[in-house]
Amino acid sequence: MNERIRRLREKSNNTHPGISTERALLLTQFCADPAHAAMPAPVLRGSVFRHIMENKTLFLDPDELIVGERGPSPRATPTYPEICLHSLEDLEVLHSRPKVSFTVDSETRRVYDQQIIPFWTGRSLREYMFKELSPEWRRAYEAGVFTEFQEQRAPGHTAGGSRIFEKGFLDILCEIRSQMQELDFATDPHALETRENLQGMEQAALGIIALGHRYADLIREQARKENNLSRRNELETMADICSRVPEHAPRTFWEALQHYWFVHLGVITEFNTWDSFNPGRLDQHLLPFYRRDLAERRLTPERAKELLCAFWIKFNNQPAPPKVGVTAQESNTYTDFCLINLGGVDRDGKDGVNELTYMILDVIEEMRILQPSSMVQISCKNPDRFVKRALEIVATGFGQPSMFNTEAIITELLRQGKTLKDAREGGASGCVETGAFGREAYFLTGYFNLPKILELTLHNGKDPRTGIQLGPHTGEVADFKDFTQLLQAFAQQVAFFADLKIQGNNLIEQIYARNMPAPFLSLVIEDCVSAGRDYHCGGARYNTSYIQGVGLGSVTDSLSAIKRHVFETGAISLEALVAMLDRDFNDAEQWRKCLWNDTPRWGNDEEAADGLAAEVFEIFFSAVDGRPNTRGGVHRINLLPTTSHVYFGSVTGASADGRRAGTPLSEGISPVQGTDRNGPTAVILSAARIDHQRTGGTLLNQKFSPDLLQSPESLGKVLSLVRAYFRLGGHHVQFNVVDAKTLRDAQKEPEKHRDLIVRVAGYSDYFNDLGRDLQDEIIRRTEHQGF
Amino acid sequence: MAPVSGWIFDTKRFAVHDGPGIRTTVFFQGCPLHCPWCHNPESMPFARSGRPVPPGARQVTVAELISRVERDRVFYEESGGGVTFSGGEPLSQPRFLEALLTACREKKLQTALDTCGHASPQTARPLLRHADLVLFDVKFFLSRELLRHCGATNRYIFSNLEQLLTDGPRLWLRFPLIPGYTDTPDNLNAFEERVREWRDRIERVSILPFHPAAAHKYRRLQIRNPMRQVPQVPETIALALAKRLQAIHPDIHIGG
């Protein structure tokens, strides 16, 4: 890393995120203008986008090589009041909360008080949505049975494909205009709707083109004032690049990076999309530019690496938009889940690892910053050298890159009906979510609290915390004659809440489709333009809705405890056990320990527990998979938690496996923290017991003691572990390589461990930025040693 | 015929220090030596009929053990690993060990035998030949010292080793580097000499530096820990020895 990158990195890391009102003001200004009141939604949204792009403050740092910020300066974070309107109290919470805070100055409060809040009150999507959702849905949501991703953030959940690197926005504009010309109002009953969609997209394309030219002008101006000759030359090149992209397709490596960055900014400015956005298979997209530039002597490897480092900084400058309430609890981090994919196979199915893959891995290691997140796709066709290099970086202990199974991803996509080519060009975005990059709108809709549903089952559908009847009456515990009856009742409850969740999803999807089209994102994802349909309305080639199951380990172990101690040994009656849970094991510590220690547990390669996990999986899968959404696609499941396992734990009483009330659940498909006692091979065999290929992603965390990855030889053994997991069909595994002592020291003296980064679940974060309960949860995870 | 069974005190999956690849290590109960630095003091006493079972020891059949070991086959295949028989001393339960080695061969599981070599050559030879890899631990290259510290002479050990050197499976030499015991100049010189002499036959030499990790076991078992005052071997010392040997042998390894 050279000096200038070091400076950019320092600045990025040391700037505390703050709230910027600029976007909210531009939006409000435009929408409040009576002249715009009658605009159809797509045209309004496209025009708002253009208005922002034409008027937002531009930012240029003296060290920069890639330009463009979402806010007026790095880490100045916009709000999206059309989706979620923050109250003054929300702003105060954002400002003063101890973790993941945003500076909110008095001017921001004033603007909110006088302009934003008065205009958007009663107009924000969130208010509308909650008004329309059924009382049953709201009760389950408030009880923490599930969360709702779209209540504060737009769906997003997609990644860029090759289209971005092959087309300029002028090309896309031409496509749009010729589409419009071909519209036939005589025969096409949807012609008006299509025309409005295309008109919105047209405005969005003009907006992003304008942004490029505005940057070109700014940089050219700066170049004129610059005394340092080499920087002046550099600025002139940058100005040329910005007058070229994003209007035209990129021709060089530098143009390609800048072009993508404008697209990224467009997506995350149009909406506060979940999982921000993501360049997809970056090493493959950039390769032709890189090779051509080297051959034509426009670029050196050193310069390419410097540009990549500068590119990395841009991601780190964009914290996840401010979240409050349940959304903050389920995803409590600045990380915005842009996940760079490396390796895997190319569209022809051949080994996709190339020289840029290794260069980008070097960049990841050197930069060591939270954003972007990174992952390696590991195919059986990829060389071990590649996996070893990735593991060397994992061994440095900041949780990146995570590891994915290319063959699993492809099988998952094929099962969902994607073509082989689209599947091969796909990958994982966000935490672990499978998608056909550049071609799929795969909305994550909310976490689904499986242990809570077991708790409700044990109370005949009633929430013991509040006494409210949330689910159907599926039987008093005294009536369960055997374990099968209990499991059937649980399955009924799961099906009921899955129904409720899907009802909500279908309603919310339509609200977005009607009221909040995404014309800019529609430019980027195939086939929105050619179909003249919006991204939010089924315009993408593939349209999937996901429900994310949480607490597989906790629910499996609880069922296993009941099966063993109630129905097999008869040591305790189910009524007595439930009574104990209701008292949070008060006066029953002996029993709690017995349940905790003497229950067959998930993650130990024991059929008694693993078989139950597979049953829970089937129950959840059959309740969700294949249920239609409103965009021409269907619902699917995946299994990941972000930080929702902490939130869900806080609303779930004591569990039959000896877990105390209010404490975190297990995360992803990982075993309950500290209960996997047979080593990592046993964890992997258990994890492989569920059918990953019928999900859109699973998340397995492993914590390894640092000495396990020290020598090349032991690194090779961890490589074999990963290869074996993938051979068994595992989707994803990630490693924390840090010992518990370091983590405990960091809790005691946080100021000495400011740089300590750990893997949470699907992303890495500064240990100091995690809540205490999450810190404790990570410490409790089993640390595997080599024997 | 009753199924063959034997005494073990533990099995460990994901063993990464007992041979190539990912392995499962089976720890036999009972050892003819009594090395003061032993990491597995619970493994020393033999389980004998009519006597109380040593704490932690349990009897298992070959079939049981093999089915347990087979669970991790996919990891052995990916990593070139397999099963390691360690202890205790596996050669001290020859019938059990032989049955296990035969079963592994039938099941195409790669085997390693971690041994101190102290067993009558008549017993040891066929067993040593039967394994795919022998991890041969030599503590003292001078006979008197082994007798003094560990309670046996070097006679069998060297006879078995000589035999292995002439003919037998892959061979790794393991040398515990124990302050105040095996680190005398005479012993280190003799060690170096032997490595030179055997270098073509020995695939790898592992230096195993003393680490007080087993102290808690001595406390728990309430037996005297002769090494309680001895600190961990500094890395520099182990590295210096490794460097000395690297001049002679291409594969010198610190740790298992």
Image (tube, rainbow, N blue to C red):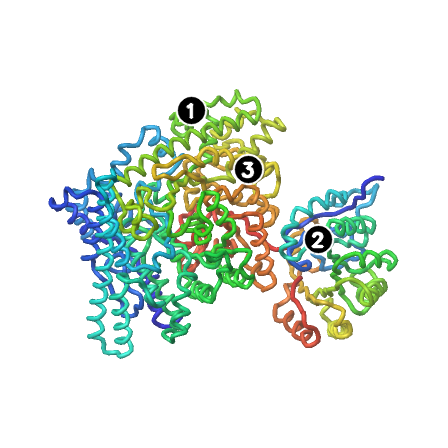
Measured as percent of width and height from the top left, residue B65 is found at: 72, 45
Q: Residue furthest top?
A: A479
Q: Are marks 3 and 2 on the same chain?
A: no
**Which is closer to the viewer, label 3 or label 2?**
3
Residue at label 1?
A472
Q: Amino acid at mark 1?
A: Pro
Residue positioned most to the front: A186
> Which of the numbered marks, if any, corresponds to residue A614?
3
Residue A701 lies left or right of residue A260; in this view the side is: right
In the image, which disc is placed on residue B83?
2
**A409 or A177: nearer the eye?**
A177
Question: Residue at the spot x=76%, y=52% of the render?
Answer: B105
Q: For mark 3, name the chain.
A: A
Badge 2 amino acid: Val
Relative horizontal placement of residue A288, taking residue A133 as reference (left or right)? right
What element does badge 1 sit on?
loop
Between the residue at mark 2 and the residue at mark 1, the CA separation in whole angstroms equals 52 Å
Of pointers 3 and 1, the one earlier in the residue sequence:
1
Residue at 49% across / 29% down in the picture?
A490
Q: Does the CB distance between marks 2 and 1 fall below 8 Å? A: no
Mark 2 Cα-neighbour bin, 10 Å: few <14, some 14–19, many ≥20: many
